[in-house]
Image (cartoon, rainbow, N blue to C red):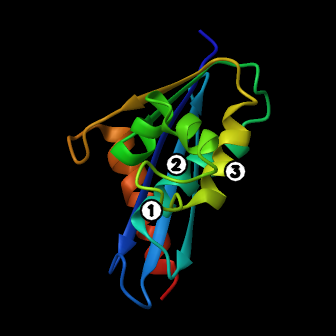
Amino acid sequence: MNKIIIYCDGACSNNQQAQNRGGWGAILQYKGRSREISGAEKNTTNNRMELLACIKALEAIKNPALPVSLFTDSAYLHNCLVQKWYLRWQKNGWLTANKKPVENKDLWLRLLARKDRFPHIAFHKVAAHSRVALNERADQLAKEAIEKLL
């Protein structure tokens, strides 16, 4: 079947501390071919890197009409998309149930705009560090990107 498979992951060294570094990595597979992408930022969080991995992977797809299966080990990313937390956030003016601003709104807006271009996209949760080869490779790409920031 002509389906794009994506595994994405984010990582952060010294998460939520000043002067931290984060990285993201993604692997896209289609018709037996693989493409790896990655990047890094300073002063970020693990959740931002998880979102950015997904965004960058979807941005790399040239034909949004193809079915996409995206795998992530991030409960934050997966649950928001599958349980559609974003619908409530949008309805509440991008405030959480506790009336606090939604964290990472800028990236959620980018991701939702990108996701909406794909009529056939499915999000899947994979356990972190569970020896799923492509998930482990996405994690490695994210960590290697962090090291390049040094």
129 left or right, relative to 84: left
The residue indicated by pointer 2 is 26
Single out the residue that lies furthest toward the top: 1
**For the point 72% across and 40% down, which residue is it?**
114
Residue 5, how many percent across, how many down?
53, 28
Q: Amino acid at mark 1?
A: Ala
Front one among 54 and 35: 54
Residue 57, how many percent across, how many down?
62, 45
Q: Earlier in the sequence, mark 3 or mark 1?
A: 3
Q: In the figure, residue 59 lies in which quadrant?
A: top right
The residue indicated by pointer 1 is 142
| Residue 60 in view here | no
* Kind of element beneath mark 3: helix
Single out the residue that lies furthest toward the right: 62
The residue indicated by pointer 3 is 110
Q: Amino acid at mark 2?
A: Ala
Q: Say above or below: 17 vs 137.
A: below
Q: Earlier in the sequence, mark 2 or mark 3?
A: 2
58 left or right, relative to 87: right
Front one among 47 and 30: 47
* Kind of element beneath mark 1: helix
Kindly identify which numbered label has been placed on residue 126. none
| Residue 75 in view here | yes
* Kind of element beneath mark 2: strand
Q: Amino acid at mark 3?
A: Arg
Q: Earlier in the sequence, mark 2 or mark 1?
A: 2
Label 2 – label 1 distance at C-alpha: 8 Å
Label 3 – label 1 distance at C-alpha: 20 Å
Front one among 150 and 103: 103
